[in-house]
Amino acid sequence: MPGSTTQVSPLALLGGSKAVDIPVDDDLFRWPIVTPEDEQAVVAVLREGTMSQIKISKQFEAEWGNFIGTKFNLCHPNGTASLLGAMFGCGVGRGDEIIAPSLTYWATAMPAMALGATPVFADIDKQSICIDPNEIEKRITPRTKAIVVVHYSGHPCDMDAILAIAKKHGVKVIEDVSHAHGARYKGRMTGAMGDVGCFSMMASKSFPIGEGGMLSTDDRTIYERAIAFGHYERMGELTLPDLRPLAGAPLGGVKHRLNQTASAMGRVQLKYYPERIAEIQRAMNRFWDLLEGVPGIRAHRVPPKSDSTMGGWYNPLGHYLPEELGGLPVAKFIAAVNAEGGKTGRTANKPLHVHPALNMPDIYRDGKPTRIAFASRDVRQGPGSLPVSEALAERIFGIPWFKKDKPELIEKFALAYRKVAENAKQLI
């Protein structure tokens, strides 16, 4: 029961019995869920030989737009390509700056460098683990073209504050929704609040189609520029006078068409996604409800009875407070929980602002690191510049990503965490 105290010892790591002491059903964690309907849809494309056409992709785009509430939707071969297309769509180019969180996957920021722009990194909010709006405000300059926000591990960003900052300074907001398919912020769908939303749909994501990406927007200019950048076969859709004469060759010199086997799978996955994420929501909130009040650990989630949600809870995390557990390092906590059968680990990204690949290479032979080659100043940020992002590794841990709401099993996994936290002194 939530708030109860577990008097179970010794810990499994020290020779005791495991907390997860019953068989775990195969489907508790299986993902993606692939059914005969998915298989039939993919095989149909293969048999028709239409993998490189766009009819099914356009059907998927329309259905996706109905799901999140955007007018224009454009399939891409992966989430990285959708972010590159979105940046070009927003007019990001040589000499511009984008502001992004440092704690994210590299694709949130690095495509800007391919356009001659440079990323400027902002710190994160301690609780949401999303970009801190106050940090954004500090880093706005006349060269800032866009803010790229990440709804990290399914937790929506503070979009009211972010959109207000963007409006004040006249910059675009690009939502990287690769962790938050189907999540809501105050009732609004993530990916449909900024100027453009980008989604990775690779096999491990909470919305999986094998490999793919989506760009979603209500802005026809962004949509048409993204088409012109990498969708040469769709340039007949262009209406903007400066783009129409260019039909036939992609401006970016890239091909951003999605294989229709993935589009076909996406259409099937979308039919069942709302009910699947509803069950994930129930399961994940059940887990955290059972751990309410346990010392040293806190939920990384939005309030469960609110109009915000965590979507499919991709890469779910918990906050770790070593000061409540006698200073026990998170690595020892993780080892002890895993010995109990609890399935944990360190799953947050490493900060990008100190990554050598962002700061050292001269990719385009400009005689200086690409990060600053097109910048008006040295934007590199060394150790200590973003303290919250840099300290997070010692204050975060992964939790099981339940795909089914099975109370007896979830209670066992919650017990593993409770048992270690309440008996942490055995490990010190």
Image (cartoon, rainbow, N blue to C red):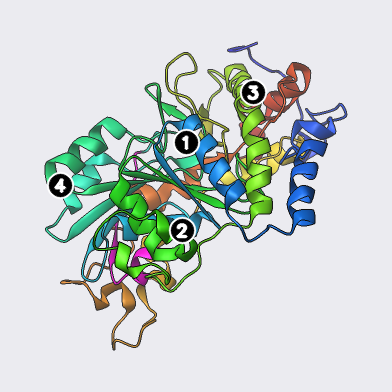
Residue pointed to by mark 3: 275
Residue 351 or 387: which is nearer the viewer? 351
Q: Amino acid at mark 2?
A: Arg
Give the magenta-colored segment's residue range: 111-125
Residue pointed to by mark 2: 234
Q: Say which mark, if any, is on residue 170.
A: 4
Q: Quadrant of residue 63?
A: top right
Q: Do labels 1 and 4 touch, CB within 8 Å?
A: no
Q: Nearer the viewer, mark 3 or mark 1?
A: 1
In this orientation, does residue 350 appear? no
Between the C-alphas of marks 3 and 1, the distance is 18 Å
Between the C-alphas of marks 2 and 1, the distance is 18 Å
Between the C-alphas of marks 1 and 4, the distance is 26 Å
The structure residue drawn at horizontal position 84% and vertical position 30%, both measured from the top left corner, is 25
Residue pointed to by mark 1: 65
How many residues crowd mark 1 within 10 Å: few (<14), some (14–19), many (20+)? Answer: many
For the N terminus, the quadrant is top right
Tell me the SS state at disc 3: helix
Tell me the SS state at disc 1: helix
Q: Amino acid at mark 4?
A: Gly
The structure residue drawn at horizontal position 60% and vertical position 44%, both measured from the top left corner, is 205
Q: Amino acid at mark 3?
A: Glu
Q: Of marks 2 and 1, which one's residue comes earlier in the chain?
A: 1
